[in-house]
């Protein structure tokens, strides 16, 4: 007898995946959520939570056969992408990307080597030999080549800090490899591309504003401003070279983001992600041009097709004149005892999506400082003008509060809207 519902297996159970679980269920899909944690956050929303090692391909194959799974989805974790590709290949499920390309796009060193091969600007770096011999011009950034979420990153201003930064980065690198890069002074940017049947489409560029929490920890992104003031310069300086690079390695379908800096009229890239971005640019694109990468990957998992729409025609990197922002302030150490104002802001027409990164009872510790786990929430604002956008930022910041056990607001990085360039 034919099954009444299609069955989707989601690899991973981080909070970001809750939205994907609920979207799939609204489509009438039976959702399995698998990872090796008994109490993964997304599992609480699954039709069938499964505790299994999601790096064990044989165990996953047995699960897929036993439960008659129709497709696989994974969203935000670099570490799971190669396993996702292998599982899809062996089970003949649709996979939006190739295993070989996931390997490149989850390894900062391999990505930068690829960029240099295709004349795509990337951040200058130093070797370990340079570091040991003192041939380094400070400040520098030390980071693992294969970690995510801003973990293991240190800004170093002298050789003593560099030694500690190297040890710290190595502790977060599964492969025990690191990068030592020049500390860039230009504006931070993130570029977004979507691939549709091998065609790369430039979707968006944003300006990334950070909060310098300390001299040594990596700055945290508190504002993503869309579209970037550098959008046209980016198109002129790098879009052609990037698309040539993507086509040459056979990028097929799905999203890709590129983090970098803009200096002297051109971008310098340092990190990619061939997956859904934690910044969730789809929350902005959905309400401006009608394109949603999360929806498209859910479609692809079960049909092998992102969308019936032509992405080249739908995407507009200037967002049809809209001014948009993702606001994500950080928290100081402490235990959250009360969160206020969230529901009020969810009801505001310009706040298109609001995700709380923490709940009452969560504790922010020193280990979370300088990582994305320190961020309080993500509020996505779509406005008709620059001034309206600034007013909305102030409104959200003055309404949402996280209180600690002493009744003090734990949010420590409220945005000075004067920093945002028109």
Image (cartoon, rainbow, N blue to C red):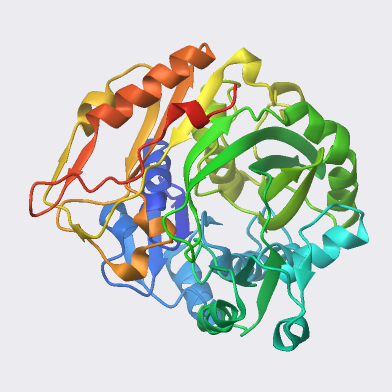
Task: Name the spot of residue 206 as percent of width and height, x first.
Answer: 62, 35
Task: Tell me which corner region of the image, top left, top right, bottom left or bottom right, holds residue 348.
Answer: top left
Specify whether residue 287 is in view: yes
Looking at the image, residue 298 sits to the left or right of residue 265; the answer is left
Q: Nearer the viewer, residue 305 or 419?
A: 419
Task: Tell me which corner region of the image, top left, top right, bottom left or bottom right, holds residue 25.
Answer: top left
Image mark count: 0
Q: Nearer the viewer, residue 281 or 2?
A: 281
Task: Name the spot of residue 234 as percent of width and height, x first.
Answer: 79, 35
Task: Work out whether 247 lies above or below 101.
Answer: above
Task: Name the spot of residue 214 as percent of width and height, x first.
Answer: 43, 60
Q: Nearer the viewer, residue 4 or 200?
A: 200
Looking at the image, residue 68 sits to the left or right of residue 203; the answer is left
Q: Quadrant of the C terminus?
A: top right
- Please give the name of the residue rendered at 60% of the width and 53% of the height, measured from the top-left corner: 275
Q: Nearer the viewer, residue 166 or 149?
A: 166
Task: Tell me which corner region of the image, top left, top right, bottom left or bottom right, holds residue 134.
Answer: bottom right
Looking at the image, residue 307 sits to the left or right of residue 287; the answer is right
Task: Name the spot of residue 364 as percent of width and height, x first.
Answer: 26, 61
- Please give the name of the residue rendered at 75% of the width and 22% of the height, measured from the top-left corner: 313
Specify whether residue 103 is in view: no
Task: Work out whether 175 lies above or below 227.
Answer: below
Task: Work out whether 308 lies above or below 273.
Answer: above
């Amino acid at each position: 007898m034919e099954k009444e519902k299609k069955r989707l297996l989601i690899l991973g159970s981080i909070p970001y995946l809750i939205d994907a679980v609920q979207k799939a269920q609204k489509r009438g899909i039976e959702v399995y959520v698998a990872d090796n944690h008994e109490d993964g956050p997304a599992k609480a929303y699954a039709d069938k939570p499964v505790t299994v090692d999601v790096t064990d391909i044989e165990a996953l194959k047995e699960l897929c056969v036993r439960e008659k799974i129709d497709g696989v989805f994974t969203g935000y974790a670099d570490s799971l992408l190669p396993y996702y590709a292998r599982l899809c290949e062996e089970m003949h499920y649709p996979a939006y990307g190739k295993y070989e390309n996931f390997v490149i796009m989850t390894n900062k060193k391999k990505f930068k080597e690829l960029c240099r091969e295709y004349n795509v600007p990337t951040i200058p770096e130093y070797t370990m030999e340079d570091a040991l011999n003192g041939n380094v011009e400070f400040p520098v950034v030390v980071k693992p080549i294969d970690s995510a979420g801003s973990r293991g990153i240190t800004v170093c201003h002298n050789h003593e800090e560099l030694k500690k930064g190297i040890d710290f980065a190595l502790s977060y690198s599964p492969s025990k490899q690191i990068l030592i890069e020049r500390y860039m002074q230009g504006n931070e940017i993130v570029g977004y591309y979507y691939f549709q049947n091998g065609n790369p489409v430039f979707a968006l560029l944003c300006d990334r504003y950070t909060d310098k929490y300390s001299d040594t920890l990596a700055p945290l992104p508190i504002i993503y401003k869309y579209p970037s003031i550098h959008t046209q310069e980016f198109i002129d300086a790098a879009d052609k070279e990037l698309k040539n690079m993507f086509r040459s390695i056979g990028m097929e379908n799905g999203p890709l983001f590129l983090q970098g800096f803009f200096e002297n009229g051109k971008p310098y890239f340092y990190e990619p992600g061939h997956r859904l971005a934690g910044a969730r640019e789809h929350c902005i694109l959905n309400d401006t041009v009608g394109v949603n990468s999360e929806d498209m990957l859910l479609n692809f998992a079960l049909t092998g097709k992102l969308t019936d729409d032509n992405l080249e025609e739908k995407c507009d990197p200037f967002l049809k004149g809209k001014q948009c922002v993702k606001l994500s302030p950080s928290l100081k150490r402490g235990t959250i005892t009360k969160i206020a104002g969230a529901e009020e802001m969810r009801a505001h027409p310009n706040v298109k999506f609001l995700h709380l990164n923490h709940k009452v009872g969560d504790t922010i510790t020193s280990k979370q400082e300088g990582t994305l786990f320190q961020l309080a929430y993500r509020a996505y604002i779509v406005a008709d003008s620059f001034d309206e956008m600034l007013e909305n930022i102030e409104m959200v910041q003055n309404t949402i509060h996280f209180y600690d056990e002493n009744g003090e607001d734990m949010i420590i990085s409220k945005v000075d809207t004067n920093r945002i360039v028109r």
